[in-house]
Amino acid sequence: MGICCPQEVQKIQMLLQPLQGVHKVSVMVPSKAVIVLHDALSIQPSEIVNVLNDAKLDASLRVFGQVRSGKRWPNRYTLGSGFFLAIALFGYYYHPLRFVALAAIAVGIPPVLQGGLAAIPGFIIDINVLIILAVVGAIGLRDYIEGATIVFLFILAAWLESRSADKVQGFCLELAFVFSALFSIWRFRFQYLAVSSSNSFVGCDESAENVEINTVLAVKAGESIPIDGVVISGTSSVDESSLIGESVPVEMEVGKAVWAGTTNLTGYLSVKTVAKAYDSRVAKMVNLVEEAQNQQSHTEQVLQRFAKYYTLVVVLLAIAVAIVPLFKRSLNAHKYAYKALVLLPSACPCALIISTPVTTTCGLVNAARIGLLIKGGVILEAMGKLKAVADREAT
């Protein structure tokens, strides 16, 4: 949950890649997820979570298909800082009250300091570092209210961003749900009895992932087919629109294949499973969706390379603005130091580099809603350049 923009990607990779047993680290910024391919004998998932939490990234193990929602109300840092800042604003009328702004800074700065300190060991200059520099400079210039305003607006923006990120997470999961009732694969509880080849029963407390291959499932009209299989008795119409986007029901009879996540509409079917739940066609499509979110478009790659050097350039430029009066003594040193501090927080590239992955995610979701699975931002970007599409069979 501590991922706010692609700048955190480098930090996370620097934390996890050196760990023994970690083979590959993929970070999906819009869905605030980190996928780690690792050797379970060398390192446990809980250890990976602890490493991320030591860097104040607020990580936890994610249950497949689960969304971790952000807090509905601002945290105590935001509320406390806002309270003291509101009092300090009366300092424009009663001068001593402006010192209350120092309390607003003290109350609101801890999460910013934690993020900045976590970035320093990796020699990463992120937005937290920029805000800390701006606040320290504001205090040095005795512009206490300005410093408190920077802190409050930053932590308030972080909370607002987490609220918007919840919606993006919902979009990312919708990519998985749109192709099937994902719930019926991983959390599905059979509402019927399923007779296996050994004449044993799968009861109503049995979950889909525990069903073995060659188990015979009884699927009544109106029920979802939970696992890929072959019809061994019965006839019915099956709605496959959730899987392939085709709205016309498909007539099923003995010997025909049926897919998990589709819906039996009219008749009774006995289905013999041909795969485990985690190996069904729809589960593979879910994996493709997860991979698609991690496929960066060319624009994203360019922006990330740009941001890698941009922040450092901004810091150097701010220093240059601050030292200009040293070379020309007629200039007002306080004025130029103030301009340098204004430059630091206002030049953060977060908004620029977060816009592309969010846009890509929305594009993937809109395509998924009409039954199209687009495998990543690279493909989506290429499709944007198409001028015409031809149907081979029609020609």
Image: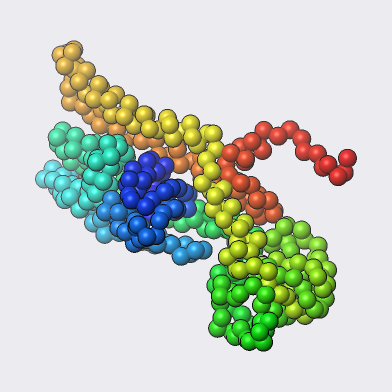
Where does the C terminus fall, quadrant-wise? top right
Residue 58 visible somewhere in the drawing: no
Residue closer to the observer: 172 or 198: 198
- Figure label count: 0
- Name the residue: 58% across, 44% down: 376
Residue closer to the observer: 352 or 211: 211
Image coordinates for residue 264, horizontal then vertical, percent: 74, 73
Residue closer to the observer: 168 or 197: 197
**Residue 193 located left or right of residue 121:** right
Image coordinates for residue 125, horizontal then vertical, percent: 29, 36
Image height check: is 280 above or below 113? below
Where does the N terminus fall, quadrant-wise? bottom left
Residue 95 visible somewhere in the drawing: yes
Image height check: is 16 above or below 214? above
- Name the residue: 36% across, 46% down: 17
Snapshot colouring? rainbow
**Residue 6 located left or right of residue 388:** left
Specify the quadrant of the image occupied by residue 332: top left
**Residue 16 located left or right of residue 331:** right
Residue located farthest toward the left when viewing the structure as drawn: 96
- Name the residue: 16% across, 16% down: 326
**Residue 133 located left or right of residue 163:** left
Image coordinates for residue 52, horizontal then vertical, percent: 32, 53
Image coordinates for residue 103, horizontal then vertical, percent: 16, 50
- Name the residue: 28% across, 42% down: 119
Specify the quadrant of the image occupied by residue 285: bottom right
